[in-house]
Image (cartoon, rainbow, N blue to C red):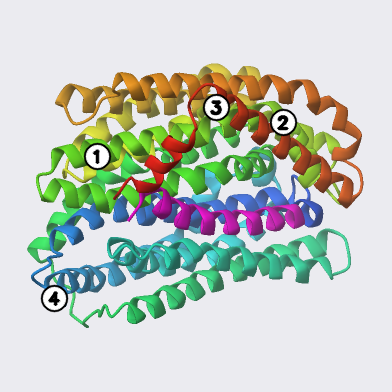
Amino acid sequence: MSLVRSVGTIGGLTAVSRVFGFVRDMLLARVLGAGGVADAWQLAFQLPNIFRRLFAEGAFASAFVPLFNRRMSEADPELAEASGFASEVMAVLIPILIGFSALALIAMPWIMGLFASDALAADAARFDLGVAMARIAFPYLAFMSIATLFAAVLNSLSRFAAAAAAPILLNLCLIAALAAGAMLDGGEGAKRQTGLYLAIAVSFSGLFQLIWLWWWIRRAGFRFAARRPRLTPGVRELGRLIVPAVFGAGVYQISRFIDLFFLAGLPDKSITFLAMADRLNQMPLGIIGIALGTAILPALSRFIARDEADGAFRLQSNAVELALLLTLPAAVALFVTGSAMTRAFYTGGAYTVADSLATGAVVAMLVVGLPAYVLVKVLVPAFFARKDTRTPVFTAAASLAINVALNLILVPRLGVEGLALAGSLSAWCNCALLYAVLARKGHFHLTPPVAGRIARIALAAAVMGAALWWITPYGAAWFVGGVLQRVGSILALVGVGGAIFFAAAWLLGVVNRETIGQLRRRQL
């Protein structure tokens, strides 16, 4: 399957989910605003969501997929060995999830107390609401962990669409909850009730995604057999890989945990500003980074299992080049127009222009690290496919130490913006370390032609950024105008920026008919 086609399938459906996510956050800004109940909700939602991204999507998928692919064989069209391994894993996973969820529900007041801001902790009623919302939403983690197992199997079978479409259900459930909350009478009581609606919607969305992926697993002809939990050799091997994979694949989410600690000492509204800004950052990160990482891990595992070093090198090179072709212009555009985007998307109702401008400043700091976050998702699979989980742990640990040091320096001076910038800079450190190790071991390095194209991509992005910096102030009144004015101004920015980048890339020889044809033919 073509790399572009696979990434396009995953990224396209992820884009649909991110669009619904924007609708969700626009409603959230207008109904809950910033601070108060909004901060309590953001913290309550982030706890199961960060655990889900860290342990389920990050560590579990990274460790499971290479082991599953190793058990797939053309001589076994029924995939009996692979199916048996997946069934063994699920038999052990379910009781672990039940036990972990039960402990988390009991300890939730203590967990919330660790991360709650001073303003949230001082308001007993709002703190209790946050605990209640977190408890109601936490079953989402268990549902999504099993759903991640189903998604990993489907991705290994090169059936990417179902798993990529599943998050749409989360956003639809949250939009329905916000719509119900918007119909309540205004005031603090209505906001509190809306928060409870949102927590219920989160758990139901996890159940719906689990059912959705189970249906597609059945349609693919894959069967899970009921088994009693046993620590078989395969399960033990998976366990040995998961713990270091938490650090290797989940550095972004671990940094979010660190951010929560530092956010606790910042003024009210800071957690909402960061969450809303991260929505813009997550759009290209999800569409490009997750899509590339998801697509190349099974393919790399197959190349390495067949001892095809040239194929693995070529795939890695294609993925790095494609990642930078898509993320560098996105990062530059968001850095320049972030405040315009936040004013157009979020201003209204309980979310003021000042709130939107503060959110835009955080966006600019977050996207400094956008290309690095995506490159980490492209480089880490090169280690996991070779069952090397130690190296990403060491590089992630180093970058986390740098992140903490930078937070100590930047947060007192810049507040939540410093928090975002520290995470971005530490991501670049992680990326540089991963690349250095791959190059030293001879697994991957940038060839002169690829490095030259990346330099021209950066130049084209800089040209586009300069143009956007010049034209953005002319739309200031439209960014906070009526719906049509806001939509028109954002479409104009996107259209002008895209046209300028494409023209510059064409003139610089980065994009032409030949390279487009080569990308379409590049195989997984």
Span colored in magenta:
1-28
Pointer 3 local density, CA inside 10 Å: few below 14, some 14–19, many at least 20:
many
Left or right: residue 400 compared with residue 233: right
Residue 16 is a magenta residue? yes
Q: Relative to 220, is 404 above or below?
A: above
Tag 4, which secondary structure? helix
- Residue 244 x/y as whole percent: 24, 43
Residue identifier under label 1: 382
* Mark earlier in primary sequence (2, 3): 2
**Which residue position is annotated with label 4?**
80
Q: CA distance from mark 3 to mark 4?
A: 48 Å
Earlier sequence position, callout 1 versus callout 3: 1
* Distance from the alpha carbon under mark 4 to that under mark 1: 27 Å
What kind of secondary structure does the magenta stretch mostly adopt?
Answer: helix
In which quarter of the view is residue 145 placed? bottom left
Q: Position of residue 345 (x, y in %)?
A: 77, 46
Residue at mark 2 to residue at mark 4: CA–CA distance:
52 Å
Q: Would you name the residue on which mark 2 appears? A: 337
> Which amino acid type is shown beneath numbered disc 2?
Thr
Q: Which mark is drawn over residue 505? A: 3
Examine the rendering and report whether any part of residue 153 can be seen: yes
